[in-house]
Amino acid sequence: MKVLRYSTQIHKWVGLIVGIQVLFWVGGGLVMTAIPIETVRSEHRLKPPKPAALPLDQALPLAEIARLSGVAPARAELKSTQRGPAWILTPVEGTPVTVAAATGRPFAPMTANEAAALAVAAYRGEAAPRPAVLLDPAPKETGREGPIWRVDFQDAERTAFYLSPQTGEVVTRRSAVWRFYDFFWRLHILDFKNGDNFNHPLLVGLTLLTLSIVITGFILLWIRLARDLKTARAVRAARRKAAA
């Protein structure tokens, strides 16, 4: 009887505490399984890049690039971009530096018209773009630092392309679908600041409390079933005795 009483009290009061969060977990899980992750990432709005050979005759050697840029790279990558071939130089300490492979200098500042044209070229769909806006610093939803160009499209998902101000590449895609998904993801992991930490004490504590509900629920179910089975046996025995 003590086990029944304690299990009932724990199950009832802990259930009141974590019930809303369990609702968020289930609702968030439904959203995350119902919406394809490709739609969340706006992959259907981005044209696949066309492979193209690097114009190596336009690229200066790495040693010359390092001298002109003043960067001693620990890692270097030569790649094609929408604004021409570029060297991405990563120093031993600090952030990567992007320079034009033909000059070893940073690319010329990108204009709003150029940013809009590059976004339209990368966009798959018929929606019209809004004017490009240079944001400094980059919004938190991009997960990036420094200035960034944003071009919004007037489609059903309200797609936004974020472009690198150096290379013109679409580095991040966001939409109303992504923000809806992100809202439920943050509710799901209870990290409303950054949306990427699912090891914090609040989530661990609520998970343990939810586990206690499951355990006490099984205890209550076992006790109830055992009591019902005992009652059913007693009824059958009484009927046999009466029939005899």
Image (cartoon, helix red, strand yellow):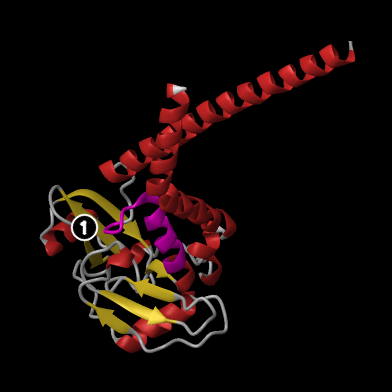
Residue 125 or 222: which is nearer the viewer? Answer: 222
Q: Is residue 51 among what the camera can see?
A: no
Vertical placement of 120 versus 172: above or below? below
Residue at the left extreme of this rendering:
70
Quadrant housing residue 100: bottom left
Segment colored magenta: 179-194
Location of residue 214 in the rendering, given as x and y in whole percent from the top left corner: 48, 34
Residue 208 or 81: which is nearer the viewer? Answer: 208
Q: Which amino acid does the dot numbered 1 rest on?
A: Pro
User: How many labels sit on residues?
Assistant: 1
Q: Is residue 181 magenta?
A: yes
Residue on which the image places disc 1: 96
Vertical placement of 239 versus 37: above or below? above
Residue 212 or 187: which is nearer the viewer? Answer: 212
Vertical placement of 122 versus 178: above or below? below
Q: Residue at x 51, y 26 (%)?
A: 219
Q: Residue at x 56, y 68 (%)?
A: 44
Location of residue 3 in the rendering, given as x and y in whole percent from the top left corner: 44, 23
Q: Residue at x 39, y 56 (%)?
A: 187
Location of residue 53 in the rendering, given as x and y in whole percent from the top left corner: 46, 62
Residue 233 or 65: which is nearer the viewer? Answer: 233
Q: Is residue 33 among what the camera can see?
A: yes
Quadrant housing residue 96: bottom left
Quadrant housing residue 141: bottom left
Q: Main secondary structure of the magenta part?
A: helix
Location of residue 166 in the rendering, given as x and y in whole percent from the top left corner: 27, 72
Q: Is 185 displayed left or right of 166 in the figure?
A: right
